[in-house]
Image (cartoon, rainbow, N blue to C red):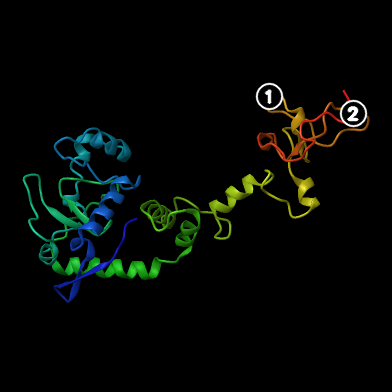
Amino acid sequence: MIVITIGELSIGKNLKCPAATQDLELNTKNRDAAIKAEHIQYGPLNVDEPGKYWKDIAKHWDTTESAAKKSLCGNCVAFDISPRMDECMPGKTSDDDGRLGYCWMHHFKCHSARSCRTWAKGGPIKDDDVSADWQERNKKSLEEGKKDRCYRIAKRKYDTFPSAYASGAIVKCRQGKIWKKLKEEDTPIEEAKKKKAGTESSKESNLRDWFKRKGSPGKTGGWVDCNTCRNGKCKPCGRQEGEKRAKYPACRPTPAACKERGRSKTWGKKSAKGEK
């Protein structure tokens, strides 16, 4: 979960420092979320031993490794190294590999020699006025976009909310990449519930719904008799006139639903007359 808050230390234009610059625990939490989130992938953790990081991010961007290595936090549009932000930073801000700055996209102190998948050309931020504008826009975006359609769908879809994964999904939704036709009242969670309908734990609202359930492949409707299933194909639950079966019907809406054993005492038992 990437947390966006403003700390107590005021600096320049009476704006408070981002909380992550003052709170080590919060900064670490946001940084780790950025490392783990698939749409961010902040790294490499060790700039001297990057492993496959640059190769992977180059593949993601569909470019060369050498080109990817030029797309760094240090020249990202959201990388803030303005004088006011330097004052917000506790302790030393530079080392042999580069320097620290504040990331306005993901809200933690990031290093200029690293990168992430959300990198955008145009930085770094060196002017206090530009820095203040980023802070103000972040505040407005939180207030204006907090509870839009994408936010509400993500909140219902993800068990853990807020989280970096949910935030990434909200961004993609607002960009029109996902959930284009998904209605707020028909979220992925509810879709999953619909798929489970027909199992032992679900109930139909009435008999009409029961008979509307689709049966086995090639059938026009109705449930299937699980006792007749062979290689994923089953006979309809209802027997034709004069048809005899060895066992009582054990009915489910689809062959896949037959994997859940019924609670009925007659499930899988032979019929009273031992029909063959």
Rendering coords of residue 77 (x, y %): 22, 56
Rendering coords of residue 132 (x, y %): 20, 69
On the image, which quarter does residue 88 sit in? Answer: bottom left
Q: Which residue carries the number 1 mark?
A: 231
Say which of 226 and 138 sits in front: 226
**Mark 2 residue crowding within 10 angstroms, few (<14) / some (14–19) / many (20+):** few
On the image, which quarter does residue 133 sit in? Answer: bottom left
Question: Relative to 229, does residue 54 appear above or below in the rendering?
Answer: below
The residue depicted at 19 percent of the width and 50 percent of the height is: 73
What's under tag 1, amino acid-wise?
A: Asn
The residue depicted at 14 percent of the width and 54 percent of the height is: 100
Question: Relative to 126, does residue 62 appear above or below in the rendering?
Answer: above
Helix, strand, or loop for circle 2? loop
Say which of 34 and 252 sits in front: 252
Residue pushed farthest right?
242
Helix, strand, or loop for circle 1? loop
Rendering coords of residue 72 (x, y %): 19, 46
Q: Which residue carries the number 2 mark?
A: 243
Q: How far apart, in angstroms, are the residues tagged by discs 1 and 2?
A: 21 Å
The residue depicted at 45 percent of the width and 65 percent of the height is: 148
As drawn, is 174 to the left or to the right of 64?
A: right
The quadrant of the image that shows the N terminus is bottom left
